[in-house]
Image (cartoon, rainbow, N blue to C red):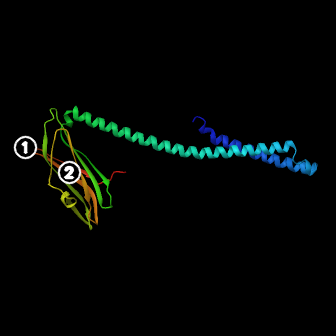
Amino acid sequence: MADRPIRPVVATILAIVAAAIIAIGGYALGHFQRRVPFAMFESNEVTQLRQHATELERQLADIKLSQVVDRDANESLRQTIKSLRDQLSAAQEEVLFYRQLMAPSQAQRGLHIEKLELNPGQTANEINYRLLLTQVVERHDWASGVVTVDVAGSWDNEQVVLPLTELTKLDSYPLPFRFRYLQDFTGVLTLPDGLTPERVIVTAATSGKKGKRIQKTFNWTLEED
């Protein structure tokens, strides 16, 4: 690996040397043609010169091929490193996430609408969704309540807000939840033709006398595959 950065220099030097030797060979051949009979063209000196030039040309071709292979290998290595860094970053975020659940600070306590993931489905109009709710409390009591999801956007040049029930089939709505640490909701949305989604509005409300209501708005962004 250490010698790869100097390969272009080596290739250039070899190319110059090869060109010089070929030029010298041509000059020597012409010189021989003027001074000696045709039968002496294949003297040992000329033959060795040609062989040397041919060998240098072969080495130059090998180095150029090696450079191409190295570029492909470097790109593959770069993509592998990027993938590993992305996995590391995701793992670190996940560790931090669970650490916060188990050892919360005062500012982090309570019910959270943690994240909303949107991924392309099997058709252009289908969207796979995953909504994650979390609870951060000291004693980890049960959190229960309901959550609603609305998709806001433009439809035929008009601003609209569509509830989740108009985009997918559900057994019950609002979506009920009951958990200690976290709960997720998954499903498939089917967007009507002409709808351009822009935002997703998620509203969660806990039940009971001390019930609370929280809301979070997500930009409509599809995750990359």
Q: In the rendered picture of this protein, how many numbered marks are placed on residues? A: 2
Amino acid type, mark 1: Gly
Where is residue 154 shown, x and y percent of the image? 26, 63
- Residue at image position (62%, 38%) is 6
Q: Nearer the viewer, residue 196 or 90?
A: 90
Residue found farthest to the bottom: 156
Q: Nearer the viewer, residue 158 or 136?
A: 136
Residue 195 position by quadrant: bottom left
- Residue at image position (28%, 57%) is 198
Mark 2 and mark 1 in contact? Answer it, CB < 8 Å.
no
Residue 124 position by quadrant: bottom left
Say whether residue 125 is visible. Answer: yes
Where is residue 185 shown, x and y percent of the image? 22, 49
Q: Mark 2 points at which residue?
A: 202
2 or 1: tag closer to the N-terminus: 2
Q: Is mark 2 on a helix, strand or loop?
A: strand
> How packed is label 2: few (under 14 Cα within 10 Å), some, or many (20 or more)?
some
Q: Distance between the residues labelled 2 and 1?
A: 20 Å
Residue found farthest to the left: 209
- Residue at image position (13%, 36%) is 141
Q: Is mark 1 on a helix, strand or loop?
A: loop
Q: Name the residue under label 1.
A: 208
Where is residue 210 shown, x and y percent of the image? 8, 41
Check the picture and name the quadrant holding the N terminus. Answer: top right
Amino acid type, mark 2: Val
